[in-house]
């Protein structure tokens, strides 16, 4: 019997860990897209390999202003390694040409310009035959401190901005996924995230991207203590209580979930700059990891009756801010692929 009987959801690696948190010191320079592709393509477990990559539309990987020729070259680099492209991340933040979705007219316009460019690249990659599925990832690009200055007004403005982003996505036949990461205002708690999705009210164009590392911190209410499901000093040995908490969380957010990140987290916050107080990504076998990856993924990938959902045609590993010496080790990617396979084995289909 085939020990890995399923072919879906497809298994993707993320390219952005080569860029996020890199370049600040000599030991951890940016890892090029080509090198990330090589590391991804080289991984192998039980004869299985990664099916694709999710990419970051930001230099030095891929410019948000990439030409058709640039994108053809990217498509060839990916295809030549037997990989596909899935989700693309639009750089909606201020340093990369965007602006806060809760900002003034100029910032909102900059935000929406990046969404449009991201959707356009997504469509071109589909037309090049290298992107069979995936979404365009966004967030509010609004620091939590800014959001809390006027929660009601800022939430309303973000919703209006996201509605305009949905109109853009419709032009390109793309779907947007808002990432559940606690460092972004309006998305900093699970209740705020649900409220925002409901205010936008376009599930056919805007859904939720669940990252197992980030959503674990929703349970603890780091940036919204009033929305905590578990106490900050929770005993993670209590599997029954953890399961109950994950059920409550995913009951609210799973209906909106259209993109999924497999990840590990030690239930501490970590971040730099605008990514303050965000989920620490750990290696899948980290002894401090609080997630049983294939078991806890079930809350997102199966419905209330335990039936497998086939919403996410691919799932992606997300592990940001690992040191380069860890990322350059082949066993790192084999361990990650093994964790991905465990999720596919438990919740996959053909």
Image: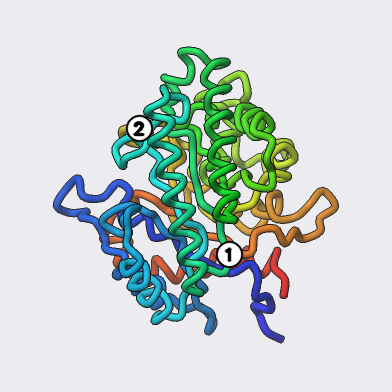
Query: Residue most toward the front?
Result: 171
For residue 245, side relative to residue 321 (left or right): right
Q: Secondary structure at mark 1?
A: loop
| Disc nearer the start of the sequence (1/2) | 1
The residue sitting at 43% across, 53% down in the picture is 319
Task: Give the camera-side residue of 331 and 200.
Answer: 200
Task: Answer few, some or many: residues within 10 Å of disc 1's Cα (few below 14, many 20 plus, some between 14 and 19).
Answer: some
Residue 125's x, y, as percent?
A: 46, 66
- Quickly name the residue at label 2: 274
The residue sitting at 49% across, 43% down in the picture is 138
Q: Secondary structure at mark 2?
A: helix
Task: Tell me if I can see residue 200 in this picture.
Answer: yes
Task: Give the camera-side residue of 34 and 330.
Answer: 34
The image quarter in which residue 79 lies: bottom left
- Dot label at residue 133: 1
Query: Is the residue 231 above or below the residue 243 in the image?
Result: above
């Amino acid at each position: 019997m085939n020990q890995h009987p399923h072919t879906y959801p497809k298994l993707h690696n993320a390219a952005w860990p080569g860029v996020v948190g890199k370049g600040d010191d000599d030991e951890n320079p940016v890892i090029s897209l080509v090198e990330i592709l090589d590391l991804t393509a080289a991984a192998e477990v039980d004869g299985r390999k990664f099916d694709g990559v999710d990419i970051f539309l930001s230099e030095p990987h891929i410019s948000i202003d990439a030409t058709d020729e640039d994108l053809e070259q990217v498509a060839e680099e990916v295809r030549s390694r037997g990989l596909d492209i899935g989700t693309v991340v639009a750089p909606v933040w201020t340093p990369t040409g965007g602006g806060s979705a809760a900002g003034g007219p100029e910032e909102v316009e900059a935000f929406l310009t990046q969404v449009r460019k991201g959707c356009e690249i997504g469509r071109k990659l589909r037309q090049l035959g290298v992107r069979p599925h995936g979404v365009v990832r966004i967030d509010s690009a609004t620091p939590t401190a800014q959001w809390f200055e006027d929660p009601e007004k800022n939430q309303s403005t973000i919703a209006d901005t996201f509605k305009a982003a949905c109109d853009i996505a419709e032009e390109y036949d793309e779907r947007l996924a808002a990432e559940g990461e606690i460092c972004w205002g309006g998305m900093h708690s699970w209740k705020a995230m649900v409220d925002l999705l409901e205010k936008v009210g376009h599930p056919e164009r805007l859904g939720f991207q669940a990252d197992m590392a980030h959503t674990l911190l929703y349970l603890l209410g780091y940036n919204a203590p009033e929305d905590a499901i578990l106490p900050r000093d929770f005993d993670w040995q209590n599997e029954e209580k953890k399961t109950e908490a994950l059920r409550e969380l995913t009951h609210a957010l799973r209906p909106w979930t259209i993109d999924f990140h497999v990840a590990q987290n030690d239930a501490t916050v970590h971040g730099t700059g605008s990514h303050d107080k965000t989920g620490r990504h750990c290696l899948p076998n980290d002894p401090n990891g609080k997630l049983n990856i294939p078991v806890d993924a079930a809350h997102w990938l199966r419905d209330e009756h335990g039936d497998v959902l086939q919403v996410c045609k691919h799932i992606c590993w997300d592990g940001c801010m690992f040191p380069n010496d860890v990322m350059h080790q082949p066993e790192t990617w084999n361990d990650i692929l093994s964790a991905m396979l465990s999720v596919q084995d438990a919740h996959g289909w053909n």
